[in-house]
Image: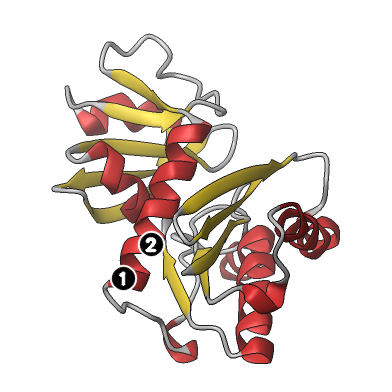
Amino acid sequence: MKLLCIDTTKPEAVICLNNEGQTNCICIPDTKRHSEALLNEIENFLCENKLSINDVTHLGCVTGPGSFTGIRIGMATVKALSFALNIPIVCGDYFNIVGGLVKNAYVALKNTSTSVYLAEISRSKCKQIEVVENLRIIEQIETKKLYTSQNEQIAGVEAYKELYNISMQEYQETMLNYFINQVETGKFVKSANFVPVYAQLSQAERNLKG
């Protein structure tokens, strides 16, 4: 298995590789635009691992939630590579991926400066994704554990006693393991079912409704 995985849903993108059991991951800093840097970063990353895109046997993609533009760029890139090279795709959303790490708790992912994507994880599965204002997070989760990304500062929860961080390394390992399992269990996704997880309307759609 030569599995290439990408996550462009956040400002800092992630590229991971499982090359016959040998794993490696890199981050693309938020100073680089995904639309301009992604393909070049993938090529350089594979080259550093002594591979080319033609060696890749499987593709993995995080489908959201997060940046609308980032999600579209990542999924479009994976679709194009899959179509051009006839490589099967596995996919998953952020919350079901981190379910492999969290088990039973709430997970918050930054949406705006005043809101988050909030999901309850039960037995490693995401029950529902909601957009919640920061001020309502503690009220909604009651006394349960809350996990956030170590790279994100979410106002209003800093002093919560049951607050835990997910490090970038933990996320990378969990994402890669999730997609390896998807490949090994044959959970490949067809083009019609390869859809983004936005969890809310885009700003343009909200403007139209308003």
**Do we see residue 123 in this rendering?**
yes
Residue for point 18% across, 27% down:
144
Residue 69: mark:
none
Q: Nearer the viewer, residue 139 or 100?
A: 100
Q: Evaluate if marks 1 and 2 touch, with contact meaning CB atoms under 8 Å apart.
A: yes
| Left or right: 178, with 86 as reference point | left
Residue depicted at x 47% and y 62%: 20
State how far apart marks 1 and 2 are (Cα). Answer: 6 Å
Counting from the top left corner in percent of width and height, residue 77 is at: 68, 73
Residue at 75% in and 39% down: 29
Q: Nearer the viewer, residue 52 or 80?
A: 52
Q: Where does the C terminus fall, quadrant-wise? A: bottom right
In the picture provided, is 82 more to the left or to the right than 44?
A: left
Q: Residue at x 31, y 79 (%)?
A: 186
Across and down, in percent, residue 62 comes to 50, 61
Q: Secondary structure at mark 1?
A: helix
- Residue under label 2, please give it: 180
> In the rendered image, which residue does mark 1 sit on?
184
| Residue type pointed to by label 2 | Ile
**Mark 2: few, some, or many residues within 10 Å (few <14, many ≥20)?**
many
Q: Quadrant of residue 170?
A: top left
For label 1, the crowd category at 10 Å Cα-Cα, with few meaning under 14, some 14 to 19 and many 20 or more, is few
Task: Kindly tell me whether residue 116 is visible in this rendering.
Answer: no
Numbered disc 2: secondary structure: helix
- Name the amino acid type tagged 1: Glu
**Residue 128 placement: quadrant:** bottom left
Q: Position of residue 188 (x, y in %)?
A: 38, 80
Measured as percent of width and height from the top left, residue 47 is found at: 77, 59
Q: Residue furthest left?
A: 123
Tell me: 79 left or right of 148. right
Q: Looking at this view, is 163 or 168 the one in front?
A: 168
